[in-house]
């Protein structure tokens, strides 16, 4: 699980300061305020860590099939107000709760630009609870490797260039002798945390009338939910301990949301094509013939049950095309699945209904304040500003910013005032 994030000179952010991440973290704010940049920083590291090129410093994207996001060039990432040196940095802490050789650790990397315009690592710092390893870029692309608080580098040279932003080179690991194994374990732990990030964006695929399936289980759902149907089909048809696990989970939440009573996978004859049937109020319809909200929420529900335990599920606007009740129930989904499946949710949302239900769940004790974090992102001149919402034991926000969700009480008062004046004017 990711427990802390900090960005410096990254896109909209001059400095987020330390941002605490909890099992359920919610990002709220106005359009173009910088919420998505928080998420994109993690996607940038994830697509870099899984790049086939070990020597790459930062994978800015461009491959529509394999990359999660296209970041453009260095200047597209660097905050416009950044001063000399022209660098940006990303750092995070993690806690895998005893599932690996390294329980806790942290990553920090700063990036600059070479004379040729490419992005390069300027400084990489990897930490465990008690040890620190640092790689600093020197002249002509050489790197110096420091261990703990040593003032002099342990080794230095051009063959110590970090790989994929998260790992020391093979030569550095070898020359660090006994410490080399610890550095390697730490890099592996960081890589696994990034691999465990599962992302679903706000733009999801429209439903088809039927789907081909090659009888395999997908590796990922995809940022547009393209493999959500394959995951459903695998759950419904492949034999094993988890048969129908995803289908049953999805159906139960669709029912709680008032969208459908049940979701059925139906084979077309003996072909390799299948259709999704939505049952509601005694009627059965192909998913193509029901409201768009069903197909848009489907990847959200599937990913909640498909993502491996221990994953960090990052969702942008999960509430899109849902009616208010269904948006509210999403809060219950995230709380229950996070607890039962040991997954972390990072949610970017504009939904007042989702947020208000989260307040209620906090008040009821369904989730503790220690396991939830709410942030409001606002634009302040050229940089974004992060405000952590202070929530008490009754779910009340002590420092809620003005005007984001509107003024429901004020609207009710205004309606009452207008009604009173009109009745008075008509003599009623």
Image (cartoon, rainbow, N blue to C red):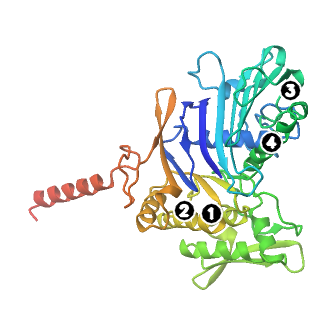
Q: Nearer the viewer, residue 1 or 279?
A: 1
Q: How far apart are marks 4 and 2 (CA)?
A: 48 Å
CA–CA distance between discs 1 and 4? 42 Å
- Tell me if label 1 and label 4 are in contact, CB under 8 Å: no
Using the image, tell me which numbered label, if any, was put on residue 322: 2
The residue wearing badge 3 is: 160
Measured as percent of width and height from the top left, residue 285 is found at: 67, 77
Q: Distance between the residues labelled 3 and 2?
A: 51 Å
Disc nearer the start of the sequence (2/1):
1
SS class, disc 1: helix
Identify the residue position indicated by label 1 in the image: 297
The dot on residue 234 is none
The answer to whether residue 184 is seen in the rendering is yes
Looking at the rendered image, the disc whose residue lies closer to the viewer, 4 or 2, is 4
Q: In which quarter of the image is residue 166?
A: top right
What residue is disc 4 on? Answer: 182
Mark 1 to mark 3: distance in Å? Answer: 46 Å
Q: Earlier in the sequence, mark 4 or mark 2?
A: 4
| Label located before the other in sequence (1 or 4) | 4
């Amino acid at each position: 699980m990711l427990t802390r994030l900090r960005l410096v000179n990254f896109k909209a952010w001059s400095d987020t300061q330390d941002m605490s991440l909890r099992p359920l973290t919610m990002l709220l704010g106005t359009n173009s305020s910088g919420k998505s940049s928080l998420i994109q920083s993690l996607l940038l590291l994830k697509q870099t860590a899984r790049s086939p090129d070990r020597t790459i410093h930062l994978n800015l994207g461009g491959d529509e099939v394999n990359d999660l996001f296209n970041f453009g060039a260095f200047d597209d990432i660097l905050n416009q107000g950044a001063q000399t040196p022209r660098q940006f940095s990303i750092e995070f802490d993690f806690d895998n709760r005893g599932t690996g050789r390294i329980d806790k650790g942290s990553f920090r990397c700063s990036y600059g630009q070479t004379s040729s315009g490419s992005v390069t690592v300027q400084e990489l710092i990897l930490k465990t609870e008690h040890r620190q390893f640092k790689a600093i870029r020197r002249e002509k692309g050489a790197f110096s490797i420091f261990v703990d608080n040593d003032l002099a580098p342990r080794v230095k040279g051009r063959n110590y260039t970090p790989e994929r932003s998260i790992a020391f080179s093979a030569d550095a690991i070898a020359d660090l002798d006994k410490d080399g194994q610890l550095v390697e374990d730490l890099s592996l732990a960081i890589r696994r945390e990034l691999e465990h990030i599962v992302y679903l964006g706000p733009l999801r695929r429209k439903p088809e009338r039927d789907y081909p399936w090659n009888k395999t289980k997908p590796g990922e759902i995809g940022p547009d939910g393209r493999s959500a149907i394959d995951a459903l089909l695998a759950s419904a048809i492949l034999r094993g301990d988890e048969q129908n696990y995803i289908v049953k989970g999805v159906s139960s939440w669709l029912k709680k949301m008032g969208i459908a009573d049940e979701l059925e996978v139906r084979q077309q004859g003996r072909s390799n094509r299948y259709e999704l049937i939505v049952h509601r109020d005694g009627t059965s319809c192909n998913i193509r013939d029901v409201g768009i909200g069903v197909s848009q929420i489907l990847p959200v529900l599937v990913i909640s049950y498909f993502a491996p335990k221990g994953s960090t599920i990052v969702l942008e606007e999960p509430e899109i095309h849902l009616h208010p009740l269904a948006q509210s129930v999403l809060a219950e989904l995230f709380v229950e699945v996070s607890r039962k499946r040991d997954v972390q949710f990072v949610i970017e949302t504009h939904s007042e209904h989702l947020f208000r239900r989260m307040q209620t769940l906090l008040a009821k004790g369904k989730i503790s304040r220690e396991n939830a974090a709410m942030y409001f992102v606002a634009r302040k001149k050229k940089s974004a500003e992060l405000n952590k919402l202070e929530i008490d034991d009754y779910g009340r926000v002590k420092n809620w910013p003005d005007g984001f969700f509107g003024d429901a009480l004020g609207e009710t008062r205004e309606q009452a005032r207008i009604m009173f004046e009109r009745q008075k004017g008509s003599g009623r």
